[in-house]
Image (cartoon, rainbow, N blue to C red):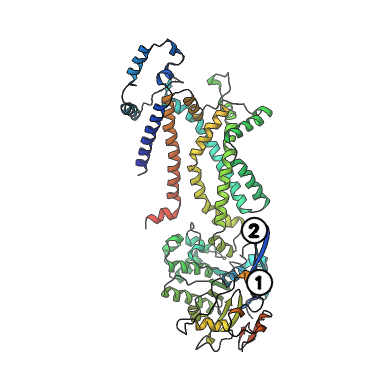
Amino acid sequence: MPILEVENLSVSFKKYTRGFKQTKSTVITSLDVTVEAGEILAVVGASGSGKSLLAHAILGILPSNAITSGVIKYGGEELTPARQSVLSGKELALIPQSVNYLDPLMRVGSQVRTSVKKENAIAAQREVFQRYHLNAGVEKMYPFQLSGGMARRTLLATAMVSGARVIIADEPTPGLDSVVIVEALNHLKESAVNGCAVMLITHDIESALQVADRIAVFYAGTTVEISPVEHFNGNGEQLRHPYSKALWRALPQNDFIPIKGSQPRPSQLPSGCLFAPRCEMATPDCEQERPAMRNLRNGMVRCIHAT
Amino acid sequence: MKSIRMATLLVAICFISFLLIKNSPIDPIQAYIGADMLNVGSEQREKIAEYWGLNEPIMVQFFNWGSALLAGDMGTSMIYRQPVSEVIGERFVHSVVLMLTAWIFSGVIGFTMGVVAAMKRDTWIDRSMKWYCYMLASTPTFWMGLLVLIVFAVWLGWFPIGLGVPAGVLAKDVTTVDQLKHLILPAMTLSIVGVGNVALHTRQKLIDVLGSEYILFARARGEWGFILFWRHGLRNIVIPALTLQFAAFSELFGGAVLTEQVFSYPGLGQATVEAGLRGDVPLLLGLVLFSTMFVFGGNLIADLIYRLLDPRMREGRSR
């Protein structure tokens, strides 16, 4: 049974334009995704496809003008705001994008210690620092004194000391050199092997392919496909959705052919399938209604033509 | 480095204020002699001018004055018939009590108000606080002083209407309680006026901090409310708040001049106004120099606080 389930999640924002006129822009549209204990699910997609917002929705840290619908379940039970405030930081942990997510005026050691929920925080922090090869002096440092790799490992440490069962890593790799990337990914793999469920949010498909068990492809705020990682090979014949195939073929080591057009803006979503305007396989049926997520060959897809 | 800047600043201020006074319509001889001017003939006048060196070139005069100043002689106040340094020292004791009280109260109250408003952003608390602060920020000090005077001294009669000590009481019979009673209204006025700025600055700074990524991350780790503020909010707003507070010495001094005038409170501010109006050149120049040092001191402290407290400045340099 999946430990974290997201069903039909939508997130939109209320905005005031010109005086009191209120507009609603939908950033996530009927999104479905599940993560199981012991696996890494990679969430890939272009910037603006709603990847980070999914993480924020799960942890209950969306801005106050956000409206959500749909269900998020943790351990089979619905994750209400009340449960979120209890579980965030204990069972659900976030590994944020950059060192900016650390308090600039607090020593990193104490910041890691605030994540420890059991007794003897100092011992727990020292142990996790040792595990991630952060030497003893680092705990006395301020975030601005950390190198890129050290910052990465510190952020990882904040999640690991909490003993969380679900780890959501939001873009853990940009701006790092390849050695550090491999190291960061291996740490994630390690925690999955130890029984955590890891959601790896990234736009770097290549690094996702190295460690993930399954890949969820996001497009314009929805999941278009969820596929086992093995299906990303060859010319992408085993992939289900035309967008995933196009994404695969756009990689430099494959055909390096970009897809025409760009992702629709949240305020101008098409009425039917969100990908239809850019899809080569699109038929008039595609514009009628949004396709539902369906199971297909050991994965899931949101396309009426997929086989 | 800082001391060089201080020295150049002081020299420049001395020179400019000396020139300004030289070119002002104040005639030093007339100011010195006052009403007896009618009995002084032009020959006597000429002699006085010669005795004081008023006929020499302006630069020579400046250097004469400057070297006396360096030797610690600021001259004698014409109004008070006392050495300028004594007048300033005496007045400063009164002013410093007034300014310090107002400084602490407006700082603490303003900071607290700003924090509460930012933490309760967009609620009625925030809205009424903001409305109140904007109103205060646009209130002239002297007007607030008059208002306080009308309410607390005239209508309610709780406090004396002015001066630093009760009138008609011998200096040795004045008690600390008397002095405190006379201090409360001016200090209150100065505090009330100062609160608005401090609160608005603190509120905006805390709102910026609360919108930052590290607060988002702290919330993702299950921190909220007071714990969130205590762990991450306070430490990130306290340094700018302290800096602002020390850098506001000039406004404090300016406010004190007006408040002391309204309450006839015998501080530096009132002395400045008196010296200006009655052409007391040595006292005026002394006060100008003194207030320059006072404001510079505030800015210097603000600067040093940043270096001492902010780890990015403190430990950043040692690397």
Considering every residue shown, the one lying at the far front of the view is A284
Q: Amino acid at mark 2?
A: Arg
Q: Quadrant of residue A37?
A: bottom right
Mark closest to the chain's N terminus, 1 or 2: 1
Say above or below: A281 vs B112: below
Element type at marker 1?
strand
The reply, left or right, for residue A124 in relation to residue B51 is: right
Q: Nearer the viewer, residue B78 or B152?
A: B78
- Residue A27 visible in the current orientation: no
Q: Amino acid at mark 1?
A: Ser
**Residue B234 at what x, y percent from top left?**
54, 52
* Residue that numbered label 2 is attached to: A18
The image's mark for residue A10 is 1
**Residue A233 at what x, y percent from top left?**
50, 87
Say above or below: A157 vs A278: above
**Image mark 2: chain:** A
Categorize mark 1 by other alpha carbons within 10 Å: few (<14), some (14-19), many (20+): many
Q: Quadrant of residue B82?
A: top left
Q: Quadrant where the C terminus of chain A lies?
A: bottom right
**Residue B283 at what x, y percent from top left?**
43, 26
